[in-house]
Image (tube, rainbow, N blue to C red):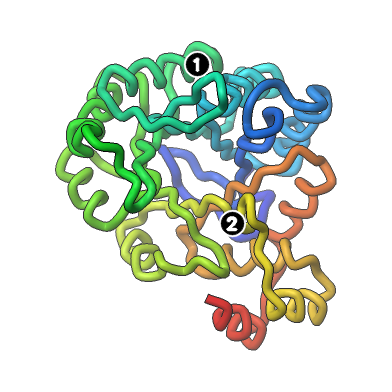
Amino acid sequence: MAQDIPGGPFELAGSQVARMGFGTMQLPGPGVMGPPRDRAQALAVLRTAVDLGIDHFDTADYYGPDVSNELLREALHPFDGLTLVSKVGATRNAAGDWLLDRSPQAIRTQVEANLRVLDVEALDVVNLRLADPGHEPAGEVPFEESFAALAALREEGLVRELGLSVATPDHLAAAQCIAPVVEVQNLYNLANRGDDAFIAELAAQGIAYVPFFPLGGFTPLQSATLDEVAARLGQSPQAVALTWLLQRSGNILLIPGTSSVDHLRANVAAAGLILPPEEIAALDSIG
């Protein structure tokens, strides 16, 4: 299935996956809480994604909570030929606040919640979500202890492979002393280029780099240069920004999310574009 989308495939958790995947964060209701505005449309997006060749889905039990996983199960179970990636290390309260919790018990509880709602025996990849830089809560469990707890679940067979989210090269080195790491998921896009050197380091090790907010997230990318390049190519700025990421490095896997079938089709189409060198140079100047 991965071969249906240009720009791939890439090996992840023992499977060859298309480099254009799908992130489920936009499927629940406003604020990533509660049911979707249109459940039938959300299910249609997931099924269309598979029809278009997407075989890598990123989720979390705290999206909803549980809503993204419920939709995935209803739309795509038993997930034949699909790779499911989830995250642990955070929870939500009734007000919708994002609360970090990396205690060993919380990590086990979150993994088990993913397994139960998705109705699978093991998760392909689980990323340990770390604190945003400068926002580590006082008294938080040491990173090594949290990652060791996740690694123990891998030894039990509940998780096949491990990853990190909001991680630094130091986190990666510490984690690799405990267990293998197959992906890193960090903030990165045309306007946020702080991980350039880290991406190269990961590529040299065959580790996937998965940018979250590839189009800017809650504050969409705004760039006159991007708009000008897109106009010259007759493409949307979003398509150009995604294509730039795919051409940036062969270990970059994309997980743009949407609740619209039309937007999904546009995102997948971006995987088939080729940016000429002069336009890549113009885009590189943005960062």
61 horizontally vs 2: left or right: left
| Residue with the mark numbered 1 | 120
Q: Position of residue 137 (x, y in %)?
A: 30, 38
Q: In the displayed structure, would residue 269 be above or below residue 81?
A: below
Residue under label 2: 214
As helix, strand or loop, the secondary structure at mark 1 comes to loop
Q: Quadrant of residue 87?
A: top left
Q: Residue at x 48, y 19 (%)?
A: 114
Horizontally, is 147 left or right of 251 in the view?
left
Mark 2, secondary structure of its residue: loop
Residue extending farthest to the bottom is: 278
How many numbered tags mark residues here? 2
Looking at marks 1 and 2 on the same chain, the residue that comes earlier in the sequence is marked by 1
Query: What amino acid type should be assigned to the residue bearing mark 2?
Result: Pro
Q: Residues within 10 Å of mark 2 (few under 14, many from 20)?
A: many
CA–CA distance between discs 1 and 2? 29 Å
Q: Is residue 78 left or right of residue 210?
A: right
Residue 88 found in image quarter: top left
Q: Residue at x 22, y 43 (%)?
A: 175
Q: Quadrant of the N terminus?
A: top right
Residue 265 coordinates in the image, percent (x, y): 79, 49
User: Which residue is situated farthest in the left direction here?
Assistant: 177
Categorize mark 1 by other alpha carbons within 10 Å: few (<14), some (14-19), many (20+): some
Residue 257, given in percent of the width and then of the height, sits at 66, 43
